[in-house]
Image: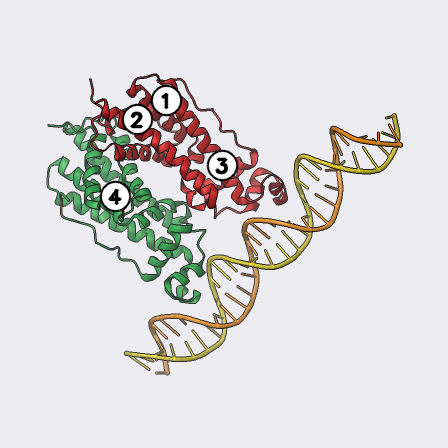
Chain colours: A green, B red, C orange, D yellow
Amino acid sequence: MKFPRVLPHELPLSPISRAALRCFAVNGYHGTTIRQIASAAGLSVPGIYHYFGSKQDILVDLCEVAMGELISASERAIDEAGVNVLDRFDALVECLVQFHADFADVAFVTFSEIRSLKDEALVRHLAARRREQELITALVEEGVETSVFQAPDPRHVARAISSICIGISQWYRSDQGLSVDELSEVHVRICRDTARWART
Amino acid sequence: MKFPRVLPHELPLSPISRAALRCFAVNGYHGTTIRQIASAAGLSVPGIYHYFGSKQDILVDLCEVAMGELISASERAIDEAGVNVLDRFDALVECLVQFHADFADVAFVTFSEIRSLKDEALVRHLAARRREQELITALVEEGVETSVFQAPDPRHVARAISSICIGISQWYRSDQGLSVDELSEVHVRICRDTARWART
DNA sequence: TGTTACCGAGCGATCGCTCGGTAGGTTCTA
DNA sequence: TAGAACCTACCGAGCGATCGCTCGGTAACA
């Protein structure tokens, strides 16, 4: 871990959202019933509706907490990394890797259930994703402008980097293989290479 | 396009599978009803069951056609690229990019609906994905062994590369931005960098 | 006397799927 | 070569189960 951790060790999710998350991760949003969520939360069906207005609202809560934490952590990571572009880039990648490894289930669900979001919740979620993408793009472009990186296609590289990090939530399991710290070290190196870091 | 195309221009899908694909791409497997598929295919509900035993069978068909085409095209791409490791690597990446751009909807659905597959169909699909992943890993490792690549973590790099290519199916639209050929040229470069190609 | 935190029962809608057909073409006998 | 028999390719109607959600409560606490 090159930088101090900016992410919480647990996401601030209510017990119901946490139970729903476990269900969504296995069966997806449409494949999960309110009764399954209630059972996973140790409540009855009306017990769920005491806290949430609809099944959709639970998914919306999950997405907003996840993207809110990711974006604020990413901004803080960049802020606290100092002035050096490469440091800020590394800090952002480290934050992204930690998020997608530590919270693999939330990351996976909020990514794969984008299309299950309705109307304004969908619009807000897409805006948040775009914002996160812009943080990456801005750093890659700044790196290219200052000759820290030599990627001919900064925007595509930025997309590649976010795909690499999001991909982690698809396969990483903390109980086998690398620790999150080792994983992020490896991926900081990989993402630097992807941006064609001008090794000095 | 550096290599002759090894992928078909259309996937060999029945009209019903094609209609189901359109529905799944918008609403997901569990979010799509048989009635929607029937309507999209211009048939009645029993008309669907004349050709498929169940809704699940349609998804299975989609997954098997997609992975079958991808794997056989990938193997042919590598075969026909000659003996040079970098050529074989480039040919595989080009094939992956073409697949995920030209057939973005199938690629996206078969990837995001893995968890909707049941039993043996799931096992077969995961085996196919592992096989495809091994094609990438083998080439990155061979490249590292022969000093064509200098990635310290070939297996993680291979995963990064497949994440980059799969990611394309999430955002690429053929009617705006780069053509598939331009896109694959950009991504061959990006993936070479990700594997830390020893530029000569 | 509210308010919070729930639950048992069940409503109307919709789900995947099936039943019993029919229309039109092909094949098989007499 | 007529007609019976059999296919393939569907469809209208509807079955039983389950869906998201709600109603009218109750028990505990303020």
For the residue carrying disc 3, how many other residues have a C-alpha within 10 Å: few (<14), some (14-19), or many (20+)? many
Q: Do the residues indicated by labels 3 and 2 lie within the same chain of the protein?
A: yes
Name the kind of residue labelled 3 in the image: Leu
Mark on residue B62? 3
Q: Contact (CB < 8 A) between labels 2 and 1?
A: yes
**C-alpha separation, residue under disc 4 versus residue under disc 1:** 30 Å
Quadrant where the N terminus of chain A sits is top left
Q: Do the residues indicated by labels 3 and 4 lie within the same chain of the protein?
A: no
For the residue carrying disc 2, how many other residues have a C-alpha within 10 Å: few (<14), some (14-19), or many (20+)? many
What residue did someone put label 4 on? Answer: A177
What residue did someone put label 1 on? Answer: B78
- Image point 37% across, 47% down: which residue? A122
Name the kind of residue labelled 4 in the image: Gly
- Image point 30% across, 17% down: which residue? B84
Q: Nearer the viewer, residue B27 or A34?
A: A34
Q: Where is residue A4 in the image (x, y as percent from the top left)?
A: 13, 48
Q: In this view, does B113 lie above or below D23?
A: above
Label 1 or label 3, whichever comes before in sequence order: 3
Quadrant where the C terminus of chain A sits is top left
Q: Contact (CB < 8 A) between labels 1 and 3?
A: no
Q: Position of residue A110 (x, y in %)?
A: 34, 48
**C-alpha separation, residue under disc 2 versus residue under disc 1:** 9 Å
**C-alpha separation, residue under disc 1 versus residue under disc 3:** 24 Å
Taking the image as drawn, is residue B195 in sight? yes
What secondary structure is marked by label 3? helix
Check the residue under mark 4 and report the chain it is in.
A
What secondary structure is marked by label 2? helix
Label 2 or label 1, whichever comes before in sequence order: 1
